Image: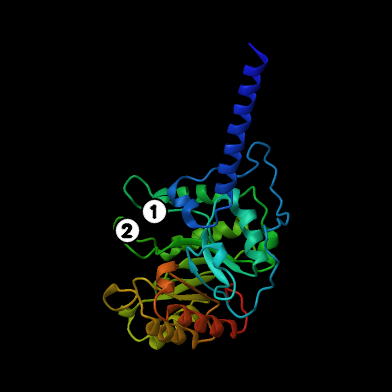
Amino acid sequence: MTHSFKLSRRIARLRAAAVATIILTFLGCSNTDALDPDSGTPAGPVDQGSGAEVEATPVAAPSLASAAYTGGIPFGAFRLPTSELGSRYSGLHRIMTPERLLRELAEFKARGARVVLKFSGGERYLKDGAGHFDLDKWKARIDLFKGVNFSSYVSDGTIIGHYLIDEPNDPVNWNGRPIPGSVVEQMAQYSKQLWPSMTTIVRVVPTYLTGNYRYLDAAWAQYVNRRGDPGEYIRRSVADAQSRGLALIVGLNLLNGGPNGTAMTASQVGSYGSALLSSTYPCAFISWKYDARYVASSGVASALDALRRQAENRGSKSCKHL
């Protein structure tokens, strides 16, 4: 083998390694839900082999100056890109994998934001063969995070809470068998066993949650036009939450919550959202869902900015159980 041939092979290997590095860097820097675990099963905890915890060592967010939380209650959306956090949005919902958790929490904190975290991933990972909810499968998904120490982000308020599950009341989600409130309480208890100080949240109106709750902290009232007068809707939701000793997160279904399932107009965003914020009881305002084209449509950005100002003027409060 000649010297020139060996050199050519070495250069080729170096070029391949460089390309691979660029690709991995690009994937690792994505902050959108393109990496949402709903698109695949997340891997296990980062240091799965040794069993050692991954410490929540502060990770510097690239090219980002640290910003303090602006106060009030968090205002944000589902599927919100991290890059959108700032003057308009101070909060978000994010489905998470163990590998991404500490890096993303560090960036949320650096941007002065608050996050509702979902650990369990999509519904298809939580069902038995008949399409019904399987509590053991849910626990197995939650267990993937047992080796990651993120307690500092709980104590400093970066994490609003643990989003246990979405719409347990909807029979369509669970093949005709809704998840009863008693099972939601078991899920909250399991979360508290692992992370005693982390708030537990379920996205369902408090009316559905009959019974007594010791481990569940907060319910969720997401307004859509078919619910009737938004002022009455928030009054009823607050009364139901209070009677159950629960905190309450609110929000709008921006893309499908208008009349006949249409997207809300800018005027509706403003009036419906202001009605929800007329109550001082909610602890966060997180809406379904972020869409860049929708936000850019006529007047919507201004309506959202006005709601952010209202949320910011509310007294800061925890979503903990009362």
Q: Residue at x 34, y 74 (%)?
A: 263
Q: Residue at x 51, y 64 (%)?
A: 93
- In the visual, does 196 lie left or right of 268? right
Q: Quadrant of residue 24?
A: top right
Q: How many marks?
A: 2
Q: Is residue 89 above or below residue 19?
A: below
Q: 57 and 82: which one is in front?
A: 82
- In the visual, does 81 lie left or right of 229? right
Amino acid under disc 1: Phe
Q: Tell me the colour scheme of the image.
A: rainbow
Q: Residue at x 47, y 82 (%)?
A: 302
In space, the residues marked 2 and 1 are separated at their CA atoms by: 8 Å
Q: 195 and 49: which one is in front?
A: 49
Horizontal and vertical percent position of residue 64: 67, 63
> Visible in this render: residue 89?
yes
Q: Secondary structure at mark 1?
A: loop
- In the visual, does 308 lie left or right of 227? right
Q: Quadrant of the N terminus?
A: top right
Q: Residue at x 51, y 47 (%)?
A: 140
Horizontal and vertical percent position of residue 196: 64, 61
Instruction: Check disc 1: other Cα within 10 Å, few if <14, some if 14-19, many if 20+.
Output: many
Q: Secondary structure at mark 2?
A: loop
Q: Is residue 225 above or below residue 291?
A: below
Say the numbered circle drawn on residue 288.
none
Amino acid under disc 2: Arg
Instruction: Check disc 2: other Cα within 10 Å, few if <14, some if 14-19, many if 20+.
Output: some
Horizontal and vertical percent position of residue 198: 61, 64
Q: 173 and 130: which one is in front?
A: 173
Q: Which residue is mark 1?
A: 133
Q: Is there a contact, CB below 8 Å, between mark 2 and mark 1?
A: yes
> Visible in this render: residue 289?
no
Q: Which residue is mark 2?
A: 177
